Amino acid sequence: RAFQQSWDDRREEELSAVRNSRCSPCDLFIGEGLASDGAAERAVNDVDVPVHPPALDLLTGAGVDPLLSRLVAHTLVRDPLVLFSDRLGVNDAEEADHWDQLLGTNWGNVRFKPPPRVDSPIGWRVEFRSPEVQLTDFENAAVVAVI
């Protein structure tokens, strides 16, 4: 908990709206077919999270999957902690640099990562953040088996 609090940059008025710090478990889940199965979606996305309304409207209006739109709009609730002056002019339609910078300052236990460039051979990725070391070898093996 002390580690989480050391990265907590929320202002007093944000504490009730943005319920956890930048270092926390993920709030939302995405997956193929999840948006069309309301019961399954409600079962895994059972936490009310703040979103950036203009981003949510833009994404859903452009036909982006509603769960992915909500995940992105929720991520955009936070301001980036770091901006690199030599990367301000990056074309966001071609590169994911600004998205990567924002995600690089939010440390959830699972992170969704698009390809770094439109023409990249690297596909969409999911990054699992290593959990704590467990007390026994059996417990460590169980964690690895799940991931």
Image (spheres, helix red, strand yellow):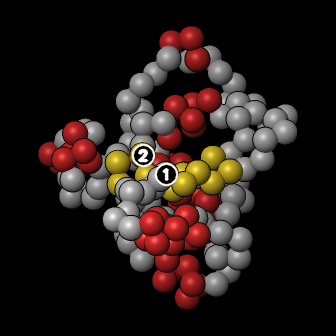
Read off the residue under disc 1. 129
Between 133 and 124, the residue placed more toward the observer is 133
**What number is the disc on residue 107?**
2
- Residue 105 at x, y = what percent? 42, 37
Residue at (75, 33) in percent of width and height: 117
Three-letter amino acid code at disc 1?
Answer: Arg
In this picture, residue 41 sits left or right of residue 1: right
Between 2 and 56, the residue placed more toward the observer is 2
Q: Are marks 2 and 1 in contact (CB under 8 Å)?
A: yes
- Residue 121 at x, y = what percent? 84, 39
Does residue 29 appear in this view? no
* Gap in angstroms between the C-alphas marked 2 and 1: 8 Å
Three-letter amino acid code at disc 2?
Answer: Trp
Between 39 and 132, the residue placed more toward the observer is 132
Secondary structure, mark 1, is loop
Residue at (58, 51) in percent of width and height: 127
Secondary structure, mark 2, is strand
Tell me if residue 96 comes above or below residue 142 in the rendering: above
- Residue 137 at x, y = what percent? 45, 66
Residue at (42, 46) in percent of width and height: 107
How crowded pointer 2 is (Cα within 10 Å; few <14, some 14-19, many 20+) is rated as: some
Tell me if residue 15 comes above or below residue 7 in the rendering: below
Does residue 106 appear in this view? yes
Q: Quadrant of residue 79?
A: top left
- The numbered mark, 2 or 1, whose residue comes first in the sequence reads 2
In this picture, residue 70 sits left or right of residue 31: left
Q: Nearer the viewer, mark 2 or mark 1?
A: 1
